[in-house]
Amino acid sequence: MRVLGIETSCDETAAAVVDDGIRIVSSVVWSQVAIHAPYGGVVPEIASRNHMRAIVPVVDSALEQAKTDLNHIDGIAVTLGPGLIGSLLVGVQFAKALAMATSRPVVGVNHLKAHVMASFLTDNPPHVPFIALVVSGGHTSLYHVRGPGSFELLGRTLDDAAGEAMDKAAALLGLPYPGGVAIDRVSEGHNPEAVHFPRAMMDRSSFDMSFSGLKTALRSYMEGGPCVGVGDIAASFQEAVVDVLVAKTMAAARQTGAHSIVIAGGVAANRRLRDRMREVSQEARLDLHLLPLHLCTDNAAMVACLGYHYLFGGLATVSAPRGLEMDPFARNMSDGW
Ligand code: KG4
Ligand code: ZN
């Protein structure tokens, strides 16, 4: 079964054609990163307008690259949330219009769960059950995944996402946007122990996290007059974020007895996080799945993959939002669908 996926939750307009939830036939991502860079972050109004401009050419080119057309698509999947509401509306309304015009079914998917499903699109998919850390500019969540679409939310950030913390830290350090990438780059070869930043909620038994205090600590440190260079500060800040992510992920694996770990989302591209996760999972003899970069960041193949399971796979009985009545949502709902 061939599913067309559509993703417009943040600043990437994306469309993809995926067969049977496992084979990517085409995947097109048009990033607005350069448009938002002068503002130091995504401007929601500008993002929506650009999704409007990009959605038709992006979907067209996904179909073209797959050498197919709408007559040969069996179903449509679209990100329903969480994300920027004005951006989500563009993709959702477009998907509904396509569904109406083609008489194909349309299903809405959760963006965070779609990030996890990206792991099933690799040559080496994880065995269930596994622990998934979804870590991006908008989200930081830990899931226990028992099967495609069967997710238990174990914990999440109570304030800033890890990527958001990195982006804000980079701005304080005068580094360019997107900040996570810049912090990764300038940290290379520097001392991660030069400055001690707090690691919040490490002593709690819960899997929830908090990153906003870290940003405040950096601001105070900068105001006090830094006595080490930007590279050392960035490396120390990055280390604090990575320490929390690694500790919570490993604790989740221990508690659930899962043997595999998947790291997804934009921050999964971070080299220090990847190295540290490799180290600790080797020690604990866990099977670590670090996704390739194009499957870490926002894309529509992951959306089509999860959509396939709802429309035609083992999740066909799950009451996922479908059809013309579904509405996008900005904030993540606790769990369930
Ligand atoms: O998943 P994504 O593309 O979009 C969201 O759904 O947020 O993630 C973007 C986030 C940004 O905060 C960016 O700074 C961060 O991922 N990021 C990184 C790296 N590459 C991207 N953070 C740390 N190190 C990186 N190499
Ligand atoms: Zn994302």
Image (cartoon, rainbow, N blue to C red):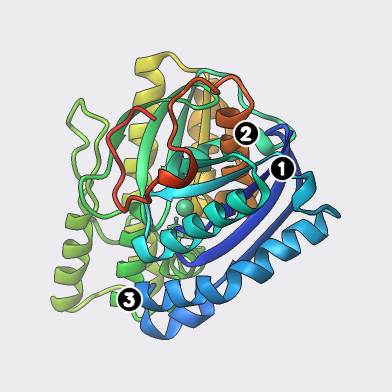
Q: Mark 1 points at which residue?
A: 18
Residue at position x 26%, y 55% from top? 160
> At numbered mark 3, what does the secondary structure look like: helix, strand or loop?
helix
> At numbered mark 2, what does the secondary structure look like: helix, strand or loop?
helix
Mark 1 touches mark 2? (CB < 8 Å): yes
User: Which amino acid type is marked by label 1?
Assistant: Val
Could you tell which of marks 1 and 2 lies nearer the N-terminus? 1
The residue most toward the top is 257
Residue at position x 66%, y 66% from top? 58
The image quadrant of residue 171 is: bottom left
Q: Mark 3 points at which residue?
A: 171
User: Which amino acid type is marked by label 2?
Assistant: Tyr
Q: Is residue 261 among the parts visible in the rendering?
A: yes
Residue 165 x, y percent position in the rendering: 30, 60
Total count of labels: 3
The numbered mark at residue 308 is 2
